[in-house]
Amino acid sequence: MTYEPVIGLEVHVQLATASKLFCGCPTTFGAPPNSQTCPVCLGLPGVLPVLNQRAFELGIRVAVALECRVAETMKFDRKQYFYPDLPKGYQISQYDRPLAHDGHLDVAVNGAMKPVRIHRAHLEEDAGKLLHDPNEPFSYVDFNRAGIPLLEIVTEPDLRLPEEAYAYLVELKAILRALGVSNCNMEEGSLRCDANISLRPAGASALGPKVEIKNLNSFKAVKDALGFEIERQQRAIEGRQTIVQETRLWNARAPATEPMRSKEEASDYRYFPEPDLVPFRIDAPAVEAARRALPELPAQHRQRLAETYGLSAYDAGVLAQSRALGALFEQAVAQYPKPKPVANWIMGDLLGYLNAHGQDPDTAAFQPAWLAHLLQALDGGAISGRTAKALFVESLERQRDPQELMQERDVRQIVDAGELERLVDAVVAEHQKSVADYQKGKANALMFLVGKCMERARGQANPQQLRTILERKLTISREAAL
Ligand code: ADP
Ligand code: MG
Ligand code: ZN
């Protein structure tokens, strides 16, 4: 019997507000411990929470982008659990009246579109952070994070493969970034994901008991942990063990998931309405306005690039990865109207350089005009392909326009026909063996001779032009010899 994996994801996004969800404390990351706290987020008696309007607006923005139905009335609830990172002994979250529900997101996986239904999206406050020092017999707690606004986005159990979960997360992150609602920085915990997974016999419609995996600090960890868990559950079922509903932790070093606790039920949290916050009526025209104000989303961006510039779906996907990269492409094409070479240089040379230097395409300082100037020079035969590559890297390193660099150093290609002829003659005279090889039919010998000519020209010649001259000369000399 074969088993089908069933996966659902819960993503927590830290909303990019200046202040916390229910108080005025700042949200800046990395401040000294407990420097950004007040009686509200510390849960001192006698204080009242007030909803941050901006967090609410950012939540609505995400909800409409994910095509959710926004609630007419939303309310907050207390979720009780006792843990030292939770100053009040409960978290203000949303239980039965979340901000939004029933949305969806289409995700491309291996060239096919996979529809993923969004179950709900709700607002809640973050907890503090515990710091465990192995050299101390106690732990520290930092409440700077307590009360920071989170939006929890929960899918229906529609995903089937670890790759689908990965693709969903990549797409969701791209959307969140396009919306400007979060910096989505996983290292700083601005984006966190819990993965739920169960197996069921192929063809069955009932869901099996699920395991929730926590401690997933990268998208790759999500994929790896799900892959591991599918195999573990399959072995367990085949060994006639029952799968227990539980929470497990991903240990990337093992690599394995390890039991953390038996899964709590909603009733364990004793949810009840937050009496300090009234239910909120959400204005339909405001939701409509948010929908109209949506920026171009990644899927639309990809489609527009592909259609407008005749790019492949793959190329459009790479360029639309970041707004900045897409804009760079379009601006460069506006000045040098050949989309394919512009795309190739951005995807190959620029991204290669940025990756190698750990730079983010969104913040890289590279001007579209620089690429346009370089490609114009290359096209006009003023520089060789090799010189163009070198100039490109140099323009990135020194933050200069390649045109200026060319003028400064007079890196021109030798375009003077007489000069090229003399150069080829000299190489032919020096490499008679290769000339003979070529004439006997060894095509490689020609490439060798072109290489020698390039060396002699110190890279400042057009290899195609050299090749043409060489071919002509060698054919003539061969005919003469016959
Ligand atoms: P809980 O109350 O335990 O948090 P939810 O019903 O809220 O569970 O679901 C949490 C996530 O788990 C959702 O993304 C949902 O799609 C997914 N999920 C629910 N049941 C299963 C299951 N049997 N197998 C896999 N995923 C599931
Ligand atoms: Mg849950
Ligand atoms: Zn506060």
Image (spheres, rainbow, N blue to C red):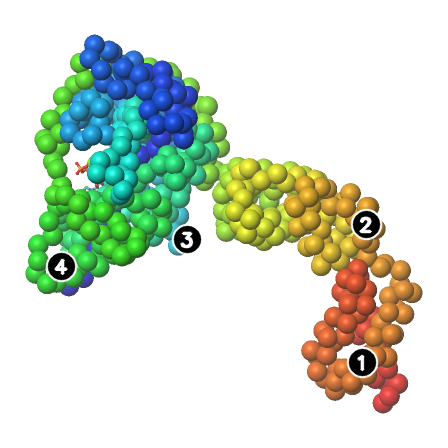
Q: Pick out the residue farthest to the top.
A: 46
Q: What x and y, as percent, mark residue 7?
A: 24, 47
Residue at 22% across / 59% down in the picture? 231
Residue toward you, 110 or 51: 51
Query: What amino acid type is highlighted by mark number 3?
Result: Gly
Which residue is identified by label 2? 409
- Ligand 2: image quarter: top left
Q: Nearer the viewer, mark 2 or mark 4?
A: 2
Q: Nearer the viewer, residue 186 or 421?
A: 186
Numbered disc in front, either 3 or 1: 1
Q: Quadrant of residue 266?
A: top left
- Gap in angstroms between the C-alphas marked 1 and 4: 70 Å
- Is residue 420 visible in the rendered image? The answer is yes
Q: Which of marks 1 and 2 is nearer the N terminus?
A: 2
Residue designated by label 1: 431
Question: Compared with residue 59, is residue 108 higher up or lower down, i.e. above or below?
Answer: below
Circle 1/circle 2 CB separation < 8 Å:
no
Q: Name the residue under label 3.
A: 111
For label 3, the crowd category at 10 Å Cα-Cα, with few meaning under 14, some 14 to 19 and many 20 or more, is: few
Secondary structure, mark 1, is loop
Outermost residue toward the bottom?
482
Task: Tell me the distance, in whole angstroms, between the alpha carbons under discs 3 and 2.
Answer: 47 Å
Sequence-first disc among 1 and 4: 4
Q: Which of marks 3 and 1 is nearer the N terminus?
A: 3
Q: Distance between the residues labelled 3 and 1?
A: 51 Å
Residue 12: quadrant of the picture? top left
Q: Look at label 2 and name its amino acid.
A: Arg
Label 4 belongs to which residue?
A: 236
Residue at 21 percent across and 38 percent down: it is 137
Task: Indicate the secondary structure of the residue bearing disc 3.
Answer: loop
Answer left or right for 366 relative to 216. right
